[in-house]
Image (cartoon, rainbow, N blue to C red):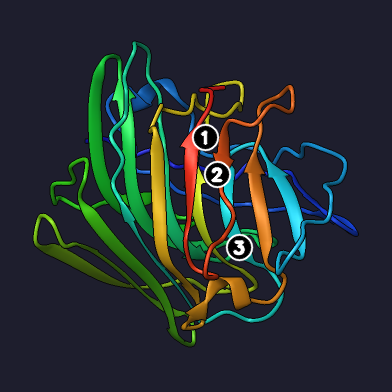
Amino acid sequence: MLRRWAILLAALAVAGGTAVAASSASAATAGASRFTPGGPVHLVGSGGPRAGGAIRHQAESTNWSGYAGTAGTYTSAAASWTQPSVTCRGGDQYSAFWVGIDGYSSSTVEQTGTEADCVGRTAEYSAWYEMYPGPSENYPNAVRPGDHLTATVTYQGGSSFSLHIADATEGWSQTTTASLAGAARSSAEVIVEAPCCTFSGGILPLADFGTVSFTGSLANGSALGNAGGLTKIIMVDSSGRQKDSVSALSGGENFSATWERRN
């Protein structure tokens, strides 16, 4: 399994202003040599509507969807999800599911999660961690559709972070301690991602993952819905159409995302 860097090419159109995010995840699959690592930050949209309830902002991104706490200092992020199955109709496509600290309004990100990709008509699944701007690192353990995953990223002081991911179905877990200087810890998020990049710097096609459900989404040990500056992030294509739909955040901790289009 080859590894490819990925960068968050985000346009975060936030009520009251535009926030730039730089980061992202992705453990890559075969064919990665067709893509250049990293890439520039791209902004989309010119401002999103203020959302109701506990949500303070709504943002648009070219490759993130989900929820994030964006006001305050964050020491941990956590969530559980069921690994979705991708439908591969031909052509390479990619999707990632992760929890992390940073990346919404900062240039680093500390994250761990899983991937569900299509290499042609072949589905491939993996688990990884990343300390961006360093490259993603694959874990060797098997990940299969229907597996129950739980992940936590925890700040340990200084420049140290602990990244933990466990697959209760397959019966494995991995904990990585890694250092990253200059991490702002300015956001905590639970995210579906369309990884980056093509040679032209564009977002890779989003694999048809059906629906993924996140539960127990936490920031600083409490419900993500209680996090400061709670932001709902919507992934859109170059025409402003949603690439997936994100449900309301129930109980402050639970939501789902449903695939709509690849690009």
Front residue of 36 and 68: 68
| Residue 4 in sight | yes
Q: Check disc 3 and report the residue beneath it.
A: 68
Residue for point 24% across, 38% down:
125
Q: Residue at x 86, y 56 (%)?
A: 15
Q: Taking 158 as reference, is 247 above or below it? A: above
Which sits earlier in the primary sequence, circle 3 or circle 1? 3
Marks 1 and 2: CB-CB under 8 Å? yes
* Residue lying farthest to the left in this orientation: 171
Crowding near pointer 2: few (<14 within 10 Å), some, many (20+)?
many
In percent of width and height, residue 245 lies at 57, 38
Alpha carbon separation for disc pair 3 and 1:
20 Å
Q: Residue furthest top?
A: 90
Q: Residue at x 58, y 65 (%)?
A: 102
Crowd band around label 3 with a 10 angstrom C-alpha radius: few (<14), some (14–19), many (20+): many
Mark 1 or 2, nearer chain start: 2
